[in-house]
Amino acid sequence: MKILYAPILLLFVILSLLFLLRVLLFKTGLIYITKKWWRSIEDCFHVYQFFKVPEFNENMQTNHLYRKVSIYLSSIASIEDSDFINLFTGKKTHDIVLHLDPNQVVDDYFIGTRVSWINEEKNDTNRCRTFVLKIRRADKRKILRPYLQHIHITSDELEQKKKDVKLYINIDSHEQSRQWRSVPFKHPSTFDTIAMESDLKNKLKSDLESFLKAKHYYHRLGRAWKRSYLLYGPSGTGKSSFVAAIANFLGYDVYDIDLSRVLDDSDMKMLLLQTTSKSVILIEDLDRFLMDKSAKVSLSGILNFMDGVLNACCADERIMVYTMNCKEHVDPAVLRPGRIDVHIHFPLCDFSAFKTLANNYLGVKDHKLFPQVEEFFQTGASLSPAEIGELMIANRNSPSRALKSVITALQTDGDGRGSLNIRRQWTDNSSRKSTEDSGEQSGFFSKEGVNAMKDIRKLKFHSHGAVRCFTLISGNGA
């Protein structure tokens, strides 16, 4: 019995000592000291190479790699293990950003290899800051270039996610050397909030996502990496809200060009030169401008802006959007493939879009008055999404009253709406017919004739050469 008792007692003592050692190491922080000692011993058996990433180059110009490394290091989890870390508030609410303190070290792991970064800062008059990459010489050829490429890609993705989208508007160039002035872009419209057929919405989102991945494909074809959309339809049908949804979906800045402020064709080119990649370039009411005989920018200037040599050189990674009320009388040269890739029609509201608006504005998915509303739509009465939205906002505390006001407006078919006095503006007499018949004439690309469709809620997709013509069922009020 004593023979069995002795080994059990010994095992118990060993386990107790191991437990006490574990508590001593982890509770007192000795584990970190032990790790540092072990790393110092390990470093004695390896040869290291150091790569400096200074904040400025020899010409005192900003080194963009320094900024990318700073963004990358702030995102890795191991930065929390550094002895000294600076905490800053981020741009978003409750967002905390971590930055490495001067002369501190942070470790990173890539393809199973450990590398170290040192935030070196000299206390001289220039306050020169440098990140120093410490890497084993034996691992340099294997991971150096892939690791730096990984930093580039990761920092770009992080910047895009945290980027504040801006709206740029052009100002009179003779007043300022810079032709753009920006404000934060806070438009709340998204693809989830716009009233659009889900099938069409998915097609458009897929088209945008495909564009984002097509850089090498476009360049292989010798084409500028850009995509151009024409949004056309009556006022208040959601064209501007759709542009905002694109910008929010992609995280792109918006450059809104006011053609009345452009001095001449040369000024138009300068505006394009001063735009940046990852942006939406917007020209609204292009049809009205083209019909204005007193315009300072010529048709040739517009055509070159849309698809000229400068456009091919400076329009990479841009979405070009043009809006019109009607495209029937626009010069076919403006609408040709290459200048316009996708045509999207924004007609007046139908019952399907009305239900989406009722859900968005009133939180109502079904109501006893819905059949009555549907009956009016089936008889050919229609309103724009902006008109319906205005009626719902005015009566948002009572869904029944809001729906009754819509029914009253549909009874008069958009005319004489009391205090709201909402009236539609048409560009020609055939516009109403286009909402009842989604196979309307599509300007330059539909002169061959298109069969009428009895159900306007059915998605119509035409393919004419390189141009894709979508029929958008409805949209939010713009």
Image: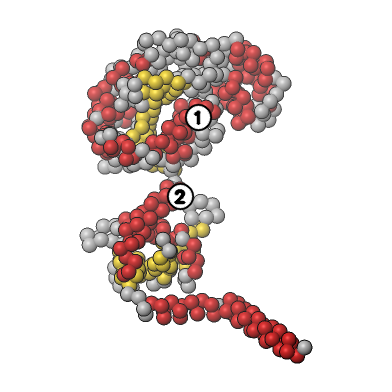
Under mark 1, the amino acid is Lys
| Quarter where residue 247 is shown | top left
Q: Nearer the viewer, residue 411 or 454?
A: 454
- Snapshot colouring: secondary structure
Q: Secondary structure at mark 1?
A: helix
Q: Which mark is residue 16?
A: none
Q: In the picture shown, does residue 315 fall above or below 438? A: below
In this view of the protein, can residue 62 be seen by the observer? yes
The answer to whether the residues at label 2 and label 1 have Cβ atoms under 8 Å apart is no
Q: Residue at x 38, y 77 (%)?
A: 43
What residue is shown at x 33% (from left), y 17% (from top)? 330
Does 67 appear above or below 386?
Answer: below
Q: Whole-percent x and y of residue 82?
A: 47, 70
Figure quadrant of the N terminus: bottom right
Residue furthest to the right: 1
Q: Nearer the viewer, residue 128 or 30?
A: 30
Residue beneath label 2, please? 162
* SS class, disc 2: helix
Compared across the picture, whether 263 is left or right of 239 comes to: left
Identify the residue position indicated by label 1 in the image: 201
- Label 2, label 1: how far apart the Cα atoms are: 25 Å
Of the two numbered discs 2 and 1 in the rendering, the one whose residue sits closer to the viewer: 1
